């Protein structure tokens, strides 16, 4: 049996692929999904959706949303996506450091929320290097 995952972002369909395994960044932790998974609706946090292909994992960085799992189908509706640009691991490490500094210097609630989101995105980028 195979799973089908569809990821839908603000601009439409991001991917529609058959796979054997998916890992979702749930608010309560990572959720691994194999075929015949119990029906589930879960919120997604900033992080990686990882899709197993025959030869490797495909990482998709999302900035939140929710996923519905039912009958070997996963539909992830995400609020935003972050592109993996042509950045190197060391460049992303530097971005994590800068985002951490920005968060530590934030004064207002809005600055703290924005800096926290940026830090989570940069950490997800760093994590994605494990799967490229």
Image (cartoon, rainbow, N blue to C red):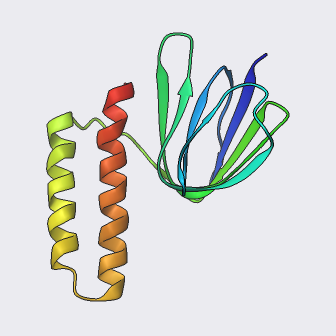
Snapshot quadrant of residue 31: top right
Snapshot quadrant of residue 27: bottom right
**Is 27 on the left-hand or right-hand side of 18?**
left
Q: Is residue 63 in view from this perspective? A: yes
Nearest to the observer: residue 87 or residue 69: 69
Quadrant where the N terminus is found in the figure? top right
Residue 117: where, in percent of width, then height? 37, 65
Above or below — where is 128 with respect to 56?
A: below
Above or below — where is 49 with respect to 66?
A: above
Q: Is residue 10 in view from this perspective? A: no
| Residue located at (16% from left, 42% from top) | 91
Above or below — where is 4 with respect to 93?
A: above
| Residue located at (17% from left, 45% from top) | 93
| Residue located at (20% from left, 34% from top) | 88
Above or below — where is 20 with respect to 83?
A: above
**Is 18 on the left-hand or right-hand side of 112?**
right
Residue 13: where, in percent of width, then height? 68, 42
Snapshot quadrant of residue 65: bottom right
| Residue located at (15% from left, 60% from top) | 98
């Amino acid at each position: 049996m195979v799973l089908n995952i569809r990821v839908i972002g603000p601009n439409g369909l991001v991917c529609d692929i058959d796979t054997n395994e998916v890992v979702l960044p749930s608010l309560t932790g990572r959720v691994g999904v194999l075929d015949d998974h119990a029906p589930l609706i879960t919120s997604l946090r900033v992080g990686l959706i990882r899709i197993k292909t025959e030869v490797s994992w495909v990482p998709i960085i999302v900035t939140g949303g929710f996923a519905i799992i039912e009958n070997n189908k996963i539909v992830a509706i995400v609020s935003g996506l972050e592109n993996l640009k042509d950045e190197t691991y060391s460049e992303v490490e530097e971005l994590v450091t800068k985002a951490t500094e920005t968060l530590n210097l934030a004064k207002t609630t809005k600055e703290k929320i924005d800096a926290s989101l940026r830090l989570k995105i940069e950490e997800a980028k760093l994590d994605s290097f494990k799967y490229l």
